[in-house]
C-alpha cells in the first residue's frame, strides 16, 4: 500500500533509476566473460551508485506539487434559494464575502463541481453576482 501513496515526484526518479540500473546490469552481463570476479562486483556497485545518483538528481529537479485554492468573490443580490445547497452557498457568501468551493464541498459532502455548477445557476437566476476569482497557493 505504501507504494500507491508515493508522491508524483518519486515515480519518475524511481523509474529512471531502475531503468539505468537494468541497462548497466545488462551491459555487465554481456561482458562478464571479459571481467574478473572482483571487477564484476565493483561494476555492479558502480552501476547501483550511478542509478541512485541519477534518481536523486531527477527527484531534486522535479518541482514540488503545490495545492492551489480558489476563492470566488461574490455579491449576494437576493438571499432566497429553494434548495439546501443554494442556501448554504448564499449563507457562506453573506458571511464571508467569498466562496471556497473545495472547502464548502467538503463541509456539505458534495463535489466541487456541484458547488461551482450551483454558483453559476445562482448567478443565472440573479441571486448573486460573481465579482472575481482569486488563487491562493
Image: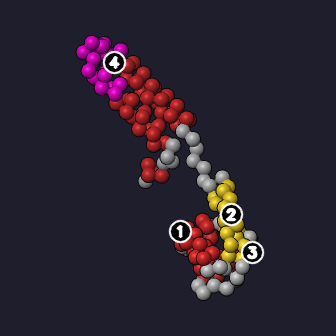
Q: Answer few, some or many: residues within 10 Å of disc 4's Cα (few below 14, many 20 plus, some between 14 and 19).
A: some
Q: Tag 3 or tag 2, which sits nearer the N-term?
A: 3
**Does the CB distance between marks 1 and 2 fall below 8 Å?**
no
Please report the bounds of the magenta region as a residue range: 23-40
Q: Tag 4 or tag 3, which sits nearer the N-term?
A: 4
Q: Name the residue under label 4.
A: 40
Q: Mark 3 points at which residue?
A: 95
> Could you tell me which residue is drawn at 74 percent across and 70 percent down?
97
Q: Tag 1 or tag 3, which sits nearer the N-term?
A: 3
Q: Which of the two marks, 3 or 4, is nearer to us in this view?
A: 3
**Does the CB distance between marks 1 and 4 fall below 8 Å?**
no
Q: Name the residue under label 2.
A: 132
Give how far across and how far down residue 55 sits, in percent: 48, 33
Q: Which of the two marks, 1 or 2, is nearer to us in this view?
A: 2
- Disc 2/disc 3 C-alpha distance (Å): 17 Å
4 on left or right of 112? left
- Disc 3/disc 4 C-alpha distance (Å): 71 Å
> Could you tell me which residue is drawn at 63 percent across and 75 percent down?
123
> Could you tell me which residue is drawn at 53 percent across and 68 percent down?
113
**Does the CB distance between marks 2 and 4 fall below 8 Å?**
no
Q: Mark 1 points at which residue?
A: 113
**Does the CB distance between marks 3 and 4 fall below 8 Å?**
no
Give how far across and how far down residue 121 sits, in percent: 58, 76
Amino acid at each position: 500500500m505504501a507504494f500507491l501513496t508515493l508522491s508524483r515526484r518519486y515515480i519518475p526518479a524511481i523509474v529512471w533509476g531502475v531503468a539505468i540500473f537494468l541497462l548497466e546490469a545488462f551491459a555487465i552481463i554481456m561482458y562478464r566473460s571479459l571481467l574478473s570476479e572482483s571487477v564484476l562486483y565493483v561494476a555492479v556497485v558502480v552501476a547501483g551508485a550511478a542509478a541512485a545518483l541519477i534518481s536523486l538528481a531527477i527527484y531534486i529537479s522535479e518541482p514540488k506539487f503545490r495545492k492551489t485554492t480558489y476563492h470566488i468573490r461574490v455579491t449576494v443580490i437576493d438571499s432566497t434559494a429553494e434548495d439546501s445547497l443554494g442556501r448554504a452557498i448564499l449563507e457562506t457568501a453573506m458571511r464571508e464575502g467569498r466562496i471556497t468551493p473545495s472547502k464548502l464541498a467538503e463541509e456539505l459532502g458534495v463535489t466541487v463541481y456541484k458547488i461551482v455548477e450551483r454558483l453559476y445557476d445562482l448567478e443565472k437566476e440573479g441571486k448573486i453576482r460573481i465579482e472575481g476569482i482569486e488563487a491562493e497557493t
